[in-house]
Image (spheres, rainbow, N blue to C red):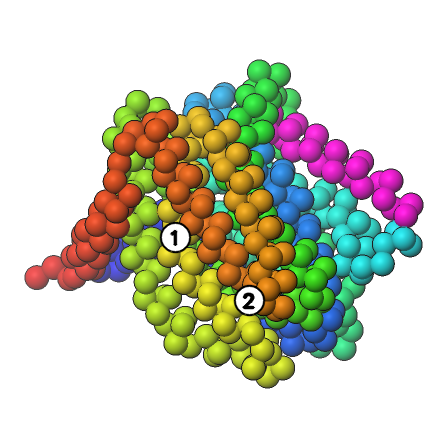
Amino acid sequence: MPSKIVSAIKNKYFLSLSGNVIMSGLGMLTMAIIYRSLDIQMVGVWVLFQSTLLLVDTFRSGFLTTAFIKFYAGSHPERTAEIAGSAWVVGLCITGILVVINIPVMFFLNDIHDPGYMLFFKWSGLCFILMLPTFIATCVLQGEQRFDRMLYVRGVNQGGFLLFILVLIIIGKISLMGVLFSYLLSYFITSVYVIVMGWARINTIRHKSRKTILELYHFGKFSVGTTISANLFGASDAFIINLMLGKAALAVYNLGQSLMQLVEILLRSFAATAMPSLSAAYAQDSPIGVIHIMKKYIGMLTVVLIPIIICGWALADLPIYIIGGGKYIGTQAANVFRLFLAFSLLYPADRFFGLTLDVINRPIINFYKVLIMLAINISMDFLGIYIFGNIYGAALSTGIWVIAGVAMGYFALNNKYHKFSFWDSYTLGFSESKLLLANTLQKLRPKK
């Protein structure tokens, strides 16, 4: 029996999920402390800074993550060294460009009146540099499916950030700048850790090749569309709400939206484990296999989400109170959370349609799809906030672009790759979920 439990724990799906759970759990705890320790205006400044930082950094992660894993997973050692070294070169180039672009702005900081943007332009260059080794290491570990090591990396990063903030609270020095320096220090320590452990494979830079650099570049310039979709829409919401409604409304909206981390945990975990399987099926020239894997993940994720959505609707005020405290009870945060939960039923289809388009070498379709979805989101944000006069207008726009994204992904895969039934994803997912549950119970059942 113990050996069966150990075997289940070492399963890549469990490790991927637990890594994301720990990272998001620590992140939610840290956010709760920040929400309770800073006033609502300063929380809004921090949200705007982080939204802008993560959005810009998405261009780097979007360029490299999918391309890296696609070429790295399953390759022989010489090839993986070449890919890792070339990824370092591409990552350094993108980081250098981001830093250089930011330098001229430093001379005009006094002309920037929004404290959130001022914080970004002043400190983003250092953030991008400190985050690079950690980012490369997570790409390597995901490509090798070493989710146990990814668990350590995420634990050091999020755990360090939380620890430094707790120290500031204990010594009575908690402030917005204190939170920022804690963030920077946590990434510095994590990056040193992954370099010392050899997980960032920084020594492979000497194995770089012009051919592989160009492979990563040409694939990444379009695959950025899939990765950017996870951050771009939330970031555009933040910019528009900050512009039209102010920092306090942004803090309330972000609280409701951030509770969707549970859904993101599932999406990231399943996507991380599905990517190598989809790539392998595509490499074997099996369209039926690719579509089957895609539909299985879409259906199973949706089945898992249904009870989460029901519980979330019923208990929405409880997590708002736990994380934000009493000052956020009675605000629109709980209803924003409920709206996002309702739309999340379509998140698995949108995410895996996009992931599959990348795997079958159609990243340009994803790129155009995301641009259209972004245009819909931005226009609907402005229109919704204008009509409703509050953050509900921004939350409702999410449902429109998610439906548009699912429709575009579905028709693209049917017309450009292999025909399939959209609803089959859910029947397959239900069957696979029952089978997985039965097999798990069977394995854990003691032998007579």
Closest to the observer, 98 or 135 = 98
Image coordinates of residue 222 in percent, x first then y, are 54, 30
Is 91 covered by the magenta stretch? yes
Q: Are marks 2 and 1 in contact (CB under 8 Å)?
A: no
Q: Is residue 296 above or below residue 388?
A: above
- Residue 356 left/right relative to 49: left
Q: Is residue 209 above or below residue 117?
A: above
Q: Which residues are magenta?
A: 84-108
Residue holding disc 1: 346
Q: Residue 63 is drawn in which quadrant?
A: top right
Query: Magenta residues: mostly which secondary structure?
Result: helix
Closest to the observer, 280 or 342 = 342
Residue holding disc 2: 392
The residue at the far top in this view is 211
Q: Quadrant of the C terminus?
A: bottom left
Q: Residue 271 is drawn in which quadrant?
A: top left
The answer to whether any part of residue 400 appears in the image is yes
Residue at x 38% of width, y 49% of height: 348
Residue at x 71% of width, y 36% of height: 95
Q: Earlier in the sequence, mark 2 or mark 1?
A: 1
Q: Secondary structure at mark 2?
A: helix
Badge 1 density bin: few <14, some 14–19, many ≥20, Cα 10 Å: some
Residue flagged by tag 2: what amino acid is it? Tyr
- Residue 46 left/right relative to 162: right
